[in-house]
Amino acid sequence: MKTKLLITALALVSLVGTARAQQEPELLNLPGDNLNLYAVMKIFQESETLELFEKTLNEQDNRVNNLDLNGDNYVDYIRVIDQPEGKVHYIILQVAVTATENQDVAVFVVKQDRDGDVIIQLIGDEALYGKYYIVEPYYDTDGGSTPNPGYYGNYGNTETVVVHHTTTHHVAAWPVIRFIFLPTYVVWHSPFYWGYYPVYWRPWSPWYWHHYYGYHWHWHHHYYGHYHHVRHFRYEPWHEHYYGKRRSFSTTVQFRKERGEFNATYSRPETLANGTADFKRKNPSMTVREEPDIKKIRTAESSGKAMPVRTGQTEESKVRTAAQEQKKEAVKQATEKNARTEAAPSRTEQKKETPGSTAAPQKASNKEAAKTTAAPQKPGKREEAKSAPAPKKAAKKEEAKPAPAPKQEAKKEETKSAPKKEAGKEKKTTGGNSRAENSSSSKDQPSGSRTGRK
């Protein structure tokens, strides 16, 4: 009875794994679409050292690396960095996006237990693959290879995929795994960085996604026969240790994602045949599969339903994008206009400021000018007074001020001449006439100067 229950449980687990495999998306509509993590896991399993793994990963002829994260129309160099922590190795795949920014692409979490057995998972970075994009081998207790007739692939094809199970003991025997757990292992940290690459590295223009996918489509049986996609972590503390201490994140990549700049890679579905041609040329002895139906490629948005792939911008999306750009430009112009309005004073404020700041000092300057022009004027210069109407009032005031002075002097003359009345009546008469003359002359000469006596 126990044996039957065990067989039933294993069958249910197999069916669940099959259902998940059938529903697994192959198009994420994210930058990670251009780095197939199944192919990366295959290269890792076949490599002897991390240095050789890095070199193989970046070779153009292998057609695995197709990332262009910074948008310079050249494939980015992926460097490998191992950061061990006890019996756990965090092997990070990283791209130098700019001279100051790095973006992690994915990370191998390799953990060895007390018995020397090893578990491995390849986890895509959330910025490039979304959450819980995890690739691992098919773990089993017996390590045998059994056909799984219930698994027909993601596209309704009647092809049987042979699932190759493995164990943690067999994973520990992978060449690169044995290498990194040797006592003499020197931790590998790629020496290359932005602007400094190996001599063999010759960047090339990235392929459109359909070209890239058309090539890897023919590796379908191997990829999905040895590895599968899961949504759970076998080493729970990894997220805290990696995202809290080690992860590198690029704002440039995030900005390009928000602007939809990575969508251009899906705009050439006709290049699918080019991928098939590349596969035939590189692998002439391998079986070529029938090309997939583009309209039935399973995307991350489909939730298990076949949906058409995004093949770039349609006319409707182009119009919508243009409208959005116009809206953004209008908002930008309005913001700049408001900024200029706040920076510069309004006309009404200028008018309010003008009487107090410009008119008042002008009046004061006119008064000063009137004083400077009226002071040197002498009575009798009426032509200058006419030519300068503004200081005319000041001139009249000046004329009015010195007028009393002669009267006072005349009175003084009278007082001085009063005691000198000893000459008789004729002299008095003469003195009277002289005073009359003085008084009449004082009217013509307001400056107060004496005319003298005869």
Image (cartoon, rainbow, N blue to C red):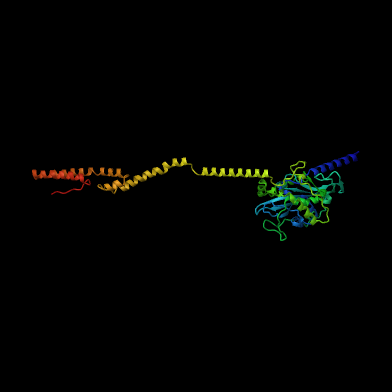
Image location (x, y in percent) of residue 258 = 66, 45
Q: Quadrant of residue 350?
A: top left
Instruction: Report x, y in % for residue 448.
Output: 21, 46
Against 149, residue 96 (above or below) is: below
The residue that appears at 34% across and 47% down in the rendered structure is 369
Q: Where residue 57 appears, x then y in whole percent?
A: 75, 55
> In terms of depth relative to the viewer, which is nearer, 390 or 286?
286
Foreground residue among 54 and 299: 299
Q: Is residue 57 above or below residue 352?
A: below
Q: Residue at x 16, y 45 (%)?
A: 437
Most distant residue in the right direction = 1
Q: Nearer the viewer, residue 298 or 316?
A: 316
Instruction: Mark yes or no: residue 412 visible.
Output: no
In the displayed structure image, the side of residue 47 where residue 443 appears, left or right: left
Position of the N terminus by quadrant: top right
Q: Position of residue 64 (x, y in %)?
A: 75, 53
- Which residue is found at the position 34% from the left and 44% from the top? 367
The answer to whether residue 77 is above or below residue 422 is below
Q: Is residue 163 left or right of residue 418?
A: right
Horizontal arrangement in the rendering, residue 196 relative to residue 305 (left or right):
left
